[in-house]
Image: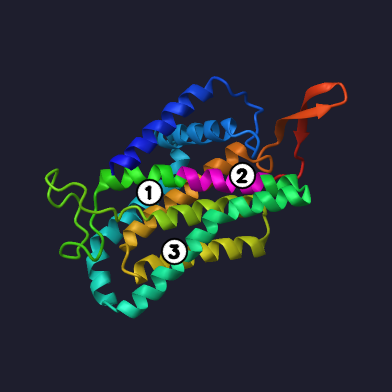
Amino acid sequence: MSLRLTAFLLFFSCAGRLLAQATPTDDCTLHSIKPCIVHVAQDEAGIVTSPLRISAKDLLWVAPFGVATGFAIDYDAHLMRDLGSNPSREDKFKRFSDYTTYGASAAPVVGYLLGMARHDDYLEESAVLAGEATLDAIILNQPLKYAIDRQRPYQGDGTGRFWPHGLKTWPDGQSMPSNHCMIMWSFARVIAGQYDAPGTKIAVYGLATAVSVSRVLARQHFPSDVIVGSTFGYFIGGYVFRHRSRQASLFALSEVNTVNGRGVQLDINLGRH
C-alpha cells in the first residue's frame, strides 16, 4: 500500500511542476512525454472536481445511477448466494476478464506504434487518448478502493461489508469499485467516440459488458462494484474524449512545422456529431 501511495504522490508532484511548462497546443507523443503527464494530471483534477459542477440536467443520469447502486448494494449478498460457488467457473471467468483487460491496457501502445508505422495520425491520437483514459481510471481507482474499504465476496462473511473493523485492520478489502470495469469502460468510451460506427460501438461496449459480468461470475466483485466501476469508467472515457479529441471539437489548434519555421494550425471539424 505504501508503495502505491508513494507513486501517487510522486506522480502529482512531477505533474504540478510540468503544468506551468506545457502549452495548450502541446500534444502527447512518444517523443514528448511532458504533455502526457500534464494531460493526465489535468484530467484527474477535472474528474475529481466534477461533482462541484453538476447541473440540473446531470440528474437525469446521476439519480438513476444512485438508485441502481443502492438497490444493488442491498441485494448484493443475496444475489451472490444464489449464484453459488463453482471454482472451475470462477477460474474461467477470472482469466477471461484478466486477459481481456490486459489486452485493452496494451492496445494503446500497439495502436500507437501501428499508427506511426502507417503514418496514421488519427490512429496515433486514438491510441494516446485510450491510454490517457485507462491511466486516469487506474489512478482514480486506487484511492477510491482504500477510501471505500469494502470486502470482496470471498472475504469475511461474504456480505461485502464496508470498513468491517474500522481503522484497526484497514484496509480490509478493495472490492469497490471494480478496476477491471473502470479500465474497460474508459477504453471503450474513447474508442467508440473516435470511431463512431455501430459495429465499433457494439464490439467495444459488448467486450466491456462481458468483462463486467465476468467479474461477478468470477466472484471477484459484487454487482454494485461493477455498476460503480463501469459508470465511473464510462464517465472518465467521456471526459477524456470531450476534452482531448479533435473529433469531439469544432475547433482544434495544433503545432506544425513549416518551411518558414514552427506555426499553429487551426482544424475545423464540420462533420462532428
2 or 171, which lies in front? 2
Q: Are marks 2 and 1 in contact (CB under 8 Å)?
A: no
Q: Is residue 58 left or right of residue 116?
A: left
Q: How many other residues sit within 10 Å of disc 1, few (<14), some (14-19) or many (≥20)?
A: few
Q: Secondary structure at mark 3?
A: helix
**Which badge, 1 or 3, comes first in the chain's sequence?**
1
Badge nearest the viewer, 2 or 1: 2
- Identify the residue at image location x=57%, y=21%: 21
Give the residues in magenta.
Answer: 125-136
Q: Secondary structure at mark 2?
A: helix
Badge nearest the viewer, 1 or 3: 3
Q: Which mark is residue 128?
A: 2
- Identify the residue at image location x=13%, y=46%: 166
Q: Mark 3 highlights which residue?
A: 98
Q: How is the image coloured?
A: rainbow
Residue type for callout 1: Ala
> Quadrant of the image for the N terminus?
top left
* Magenta residue check for 130: yes
Residue type for callout 2: Val
Q: Is residue 182 above or below residue 52?
A: below
